[in-house]
Image (cartoon, rainbow, N blue to C red):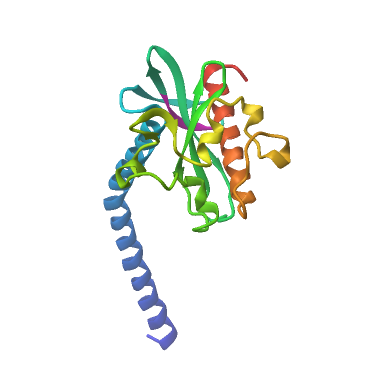
Amino acid sequence: MNEYMRFSIVLLVICGVCGGALGVFKSLTAEPIKVAEKAAKERSVREIFGETAKLEEKVFKNDTETFSYYVVDLGGKTYYAVIGTATGYTKSVPIQVLVGIDADMNVYRIAVAQSSETPGLGENIREVEKDLYFSDFFSTRDAGAPDRDKRVFLRQFNDKKPEECKVTRDSGKIDAITGATITSRAVCTAVGDAVAKVRKITGKE
């Protein structure tokens, strides 16, 4: 056996072992990752609708796309909650925004489900008013004023019509975060994506 053939066989064996190991690792981590993603999504739904809302997860499927969503019963009123996606400043990790939408296609509230934007700039989309107690960072409302949303950027989307969910530079009603206009626009785009999905779900395209 010449040197080139020996090298090729060794390389093939190494690739096979590495590929097999990656396959095993993927199979072992797939379910925990799926469970973690589902839990994160449900936390975002609760951030919008609170702990008393009744949730029912469903799946929408047509010829071109498949996605999950929630039908939410809050005080006898029906809402939809679905993830909208857009590319922000960090292009390798898309921004995912969970959007609560009522039957009239208006935005109720939104929550960030995934974001890896620049700390101190784009990640300020998650900013909460600084006068909160530590425990309040896990809630969108003040215990003394339950209806007061303390999320600085995200609360601007509360009770908005879809066409209003644009930054002011784009003739909308959302004030962009200083130094993070790209991220702010991406959140608005993700909201629009979510609204479009709910229109498909309800047949109101």
Q: Which residue is drawn at 34% across and 41% down?
A: 136
Name the image quarter holding the N terminus. Answer: bottom left
Instruction: Please identify the dominant SS of the magenta region.
Output: strand
Image position of 8 (left or right of 167): left
From this view, report whether residue 11 is shown above or below residue 58: below
**Residue 181: image x %, image y %?**
64, 49
**Magenta segment boundaries in residue numbering:** 65-70
Q: Residue at x 53, y 48 (%)?
A: 94
In the rendered image, residue 3 lying in the magenta stretch gets the answer no
In the rendered image, residue 66 lying in the magenta stretch gets the answer yes
**Residue 127: image x %, image y %?**
47, 47
Viewer-nearest residue: 154 or 93 = 154
Q: Which picture quadrant has residue 78?
A: top left
Q: Across the whole image, how many numbered discs are drawn on residues?
A: 0
In the displayed orientation, state which residue is furthest to the top. Answer: 76
From this view, report whether residue 147 is shown above or below residue 21: above
**Residue 195: image x %, image y %?**
57, 28
